[in-house]
């Protein structure tokens, strides 16, 4: 009888990909508050996003663009860029 192998990821999901939908929706719905940045662990960028929203109103537009980018990337691209690669902006 062959030894049992355990698959740490039986569903075939990419670790970190579960953040894509939540981060994308947070960016689109309440992105001006920088919540999607904090959710992804980008504290400094989240604070900058809030300041951009309150000082010149650009934070919400930037967040909308980021949300669309998050949701249109494949799971592999999202994880490589924003989870593992730690790319804080666009």
Image (tube, grey):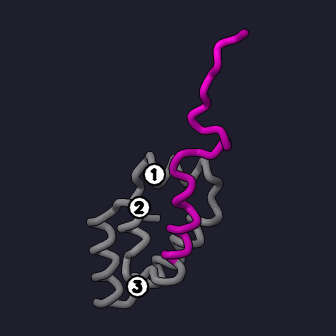
Taking depth in this image into account, of 40 and 59 the one nearest to the observer is 40
Helix, strand or loop status at disc 1: helix
For marks 1 and 3 on the same chain, the one whose residue lies earlier in the sequence = 3
Taking depth in this image into account, of 51 and 75 the one nearest to the observer is 75
Residue tagged by mark 2? Answer: 40
Helix, strand or loop status at disc 3: helix
Residue tagged by mark 1? Answer: 83
Q: Quadrant of the N terminus?
A: top right
- The image quarter containing residue 73 is bottom right
Q: Could you say which disc has been placed on residue 56 in the image?
A: none
Give yes or no for contact between labels 1 and 3 (Cβ–Cβ under 8 Å): no
Residue drawn at the location 43% of the way across and 71% of the way down: 36
Residue 26 falls within the magenta-colored stretch: yes
Taking depth in this image into account, of 74 and 65 the one nearest to the observer is 74
Label 1 Cα crowd, 10 Å radius (few <14 / some 14-19 / many 20+): some
Taking depth in this image into account, of 51 and 35 the one nearest to the observer is 35
Relative placement, left or right, of 71 versus 88 is right
Residue 86 % position (x, y): 40, 52
Give yes or no for contact between labels 3 and 2 (Cβ–Cβ under 8 Å): no
Residue 3 % position (x, y): 65, 13
Residue at the extreme front: 1
Q: Nearer the viewer, mark 1 or mark 3?
A: 1
Q: Nearer the viewer, mark 3 or mark 2?
A: 2
Residue drawn at the location 45% of the way across and 79% of the way down: 31
- Stretch of the chain drawn in magenta: 1-27
Label 2 Cα crowd, 10 Å radius (few <14 / some 14-19 / many 20+): some
Residue drawn at the location 32% of the way across and 82% of the way down: 52
* Whole-number angstrom distance, CA of label 1 to CA of label 2: 7 Å
Residue tagged by mark 3? Answer: 58
């Amino acid at each position: 009888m062959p030894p049992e192998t355990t698959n740490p990821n039986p569903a075939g999901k990419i670790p970190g990909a579960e953040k894509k939908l939540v981060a994308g929706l947070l960016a689109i719905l309440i992105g001006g508050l920088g919540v999607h940045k904090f959710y992804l662990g980008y504290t400094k960028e989240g604070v900058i996003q809030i300041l951009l929203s309150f000082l010149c109103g650009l934070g919400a537009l930037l967040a909308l663009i980021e949300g669309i980018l998050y949701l249109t990337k494949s799971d592999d691209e999202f994880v490589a860029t924003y989870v593992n690669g730690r790319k804080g902006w666009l």
